[in-house]
Image (cartoon, grey):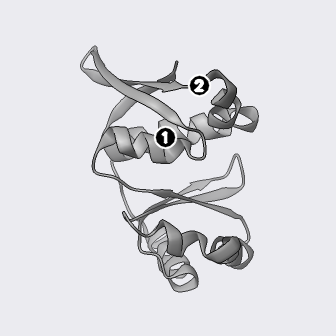
Amino acid sequence: MGVVLTEETMGLIARFEQLTGASSRDVIKDDENDRYIFIVNSGEMGHAIGKKGVNIKKASDSLGRRCEAVEYADDPAQFLRNCFLPANVSEVQFSDYDGGVIAHVMIHAEERGIAIGKAGKNIAKTKQLALRLHNIAEVYLE
């Protein structure tokens, strides 16, 4: 799938960066959950969130939708860990299936609800980001 930046997404990224001071490499407009998911550069998560969440709230208010941020990582396993925060990922394994990469993410049973999210929105976000940014065809929680 890959990342394709449109005029709209470039405008959203520029506005997010202006509001939070965090550099962003991509944004996904999630109409189903009425949110924007910004992929911020490594080391920029503190700026994106801000002290007591003030920056992300300011971005949400200004852009008219809930804004979420995920910290990018070149390492696919670390990126998946970042996607599932605040749930604690104990291990990530990869396997090949019909030419595609599948991620098997181990999360403790008591944190599975956090990882899945209300109506499955967190796992859906992670699957979309994994495919878009690391060409991971599927993500399974175990």
Tag 2: residue type?
Answer: His
Count neighbours of disc 1 (C-alpha within 10 A) and say few if under 14, some if 14 to 19, many if 20 or more: some
* Residue 66 visible in the snapshot: yes
Q: Nearer the viewer, residue 6 or 138?
A: 138
Which residue in the structure is indicated by mark 1? Answer: 128
Residue 29 drawn above or below residue 97 = below
Which residue in the structure is indicated by mark 2? Answer: 108
State the image quarter where residue 53 is shown: bottom right
Task: Describe the element under mark 2 as helix, strand or loop.
Answer: loop
Please report the residue visible at 36 percent of the width from the left and 57 percent of the height from the top.
Answer: 4
Count neighbours of disc 2 (C-alpha within 10 A) and say few if under 14, some if 14 to 19, many if 20 or more: some
Residue 40 drawn above or below residue 7 = above
* Residue 1 visible in the snapshot: no
Q: Nearer the viewer, residue 134 or 98?
A: 134
Spot occupied by residue 113 in the image (x, y as percentages of width and height): 70, 30
Please report the residue visible at 39 percent of the width from the left and 64 percent of the height from the top.
Answer: 5
Q: CA distance from mark 1 to mark 2?
A: 22 Å
| Side (left or right) of 31 relative to 6 | right
Q: Residue at the far bottom: name it.
A: 18
| Side (left or right) of 124 relative to 39 | right
Q: Residue at the far top: name it.
A: 98
Q: Assess whether mark 2 and mark 1 are in contact (beta carbons under 8 angstroms).
A: no
Which image quarter is the N terminus in?
top left
Sequence-wise, the earlier of marks 1 and 2 is 2
Q: Determine which of the numbered discs, if any, sits on residue 136 in the image.
A: none
Please report the residue visible at 28 percent of the width from the left and 45 percent of the height from the top.
Answer: 75
Q: Nearer the viewer, mark 1 or mark 2?
A: 2
Tag 1: residue type?
Answer: Gln
Spot occupied by residue 55 in the image (x, y as percentages of width and height): 63, 77
Task: Describe the element under mark 1 as helix, strand or loop.
Answer: helix
